Amino acid sequence: MLSSGTRIGPFDVKSWIKEGSCGQSYQGDGRTGEDKGKVKYLKLFHRDLAETEGFSDYFSQECRAIQQIEGRGIWPMRSNGTMKWKHWMAYDWFDGKKIQLPNDSENDEKREINLRSLSDWIEFLPEQVGPEELKSIMIDLHCGLNQAHGFGVIHGNLKPSNVIICQKEDQSFEAWITEFALSKIASFQPLGADQKEGKEFVSQSLQFQESQKESQLYRPRDTRSGDIAEEKWDLFALGSLVKYVIEKSPRGSDQWVDWREWSDKSLHNAFSTVPQSMESIPGIGSLPAYGIRGGNVADAEGLSDDEIRHKREIEWEQNKKISSARFRRNITGLIGCLCLFIFLFSKIYLFFCPSPWVEYSVAGALDKYQLGFGVWKGKAWGILPSSYDHDGKGGQDVAGEWEREDGLLRLNFRKFKKLNDEDSGKKLWQFIGKGATSEDDYFIWSDYLEYNWQANELELIKRVDQSEVFVPGKRGDDSPHLFPEIRIRRSNGQIKRAELIFKQTDEKRPSWSFYIGVGFLLASLMYHRVLLSVSSPVVVSVKD
């Protein structure tokens, strides 16, 4: 027995519960991760068994099989592990229903107990479990066993204390089977030992021995402790559970006629599979309503329990490969489609707008432009003209905004005029703050550009400031530059209109988004072929 505070994996022992035929039970508290602060039911196998050579590998193998079963009627194992000699399993804690019972002592104080298992309910409130309530319980148990047997997992120790039930608001019951396959793990024999003659670990405690005796009551008479459990054990146990409820019930025997007949059939091996047993439950109706087919996988395919388990393990590994291949196919396909979408979007965007944040310049001049991303407007960058520079040099960067106007791109810029100008009568700091400046304190101008998407170039149409309109022109063989529009008109043809073209400075590079997209789509196609190859049905040969 472990003392309170002892560590078992990521849990701390809180209190001792009991010692059963398959090991010791504790209440534990989670100390790390998602289980931190949560109460858990811990199952610990006996040390003498855990230290047997080969047990750790066997334990891990069985736990992988148990982890596959989850669904209606199954109280699933949440985690497992090994810590030195401690081989443990963890389950969610089940509170059950709290009731008060009168005390036998003279003070007549009431004591509280929690009804968790079928044995608790039958011991303290047997009148609550009638034929209809038993039907709900047995349906859940059959659904759980059908799921487990389909994965080749046999319980082997099904008894009232291993069936936990909960009474719902409508007074019906919901039931779950817990501690699947623990009897098989506890019956482990080292490699080379005769499995038929092997026996379970034997403890000297009275709780262990009583649990062993109870377990034997719910197993076929021709079995003994240590035998490897078979499917018929669980079917026999179902009949024994019904017989147990009927014998303990205070209700009249006339209410149990159908159930007594069903129990007798189950105890005399009238059912070879879980679906056959379930079909005979009084008032059951159609099995497909519970997600169960008629017949059994093992009978239909001629497979033994071990072959069924082997097949399920192969299918489990296959499903992992399928999930991995499907994820890789989907993610590479998604990235490929996303890259092609970006490529297509960029082509459509460049049909209407120049390349965002790409420099456009004209040969032999300092003038340059960059336009930020946008559909109708956005940020812009240009070069300060010398005429708007306090020092008369120009060439500095200037930020602005662009917008569409009459089919052209209008770039709006502004530059502060005065820098501690003595003629202004104001100091520089007096221009700081909201409302401290006006439009007269700035040079404000707008450049109108036309975008040619075929050549990916910008043509400067005109520049408009607070006083004049400038348009591109040239005199003789000179390079084109901006002239006041009125000056061109008065030049008598000496200055002629010209085109001022700004071409993309950076060399045109290949569209990597296109090639990356095609590459990922090809990878997605390869993963799809892998998915098809690993999706072939699992075939297990039947032993003679």
Image: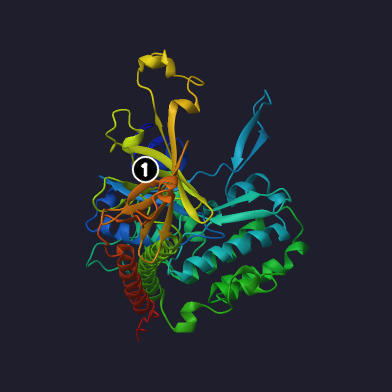
Among the 4 quarters of the image, the one containing residue 413: top left
Q: Secondary structure at mark 1?
A: strand
Q: State the residue at coordinates (43%, 29%).
A: 442
Q: Is residue 518 left or right of residue 275?
A: left
Label 1 sits on residue: 381
Q: Is residue 219 left or right of residue 540?
A: right
Residue in the foreground of this view, choosing between 386 and 160: 386
For the C terminus, the image quarter is bottom left
Is residue 363 in view from this perspective? yes
Q: Is residue 52 left or right of residue 254?
A: left
Point out residue 13 in the picture as x, y percentages from the top left corner. 39, 36
Task: Please rate how many residues cluster around mark 1, counting C-alpha atoms within 10 Å: few if below 14, some from 14 to 19, many from 20.
Answer: many
Point out residue 406 in the picture as x, y percentages from the top left corner. 54, 54
Residue in the foreground of this view, choosing between 50 and 498: 498
302 up-or-down from 162: above or below? below
Q: State the residue at coordinates (52%, 78%).
A: 296
Q: Give the amino acid type for the residue marked by disc 1 in the picture.
A: Trp
For the N terminus, the image quarter is top left
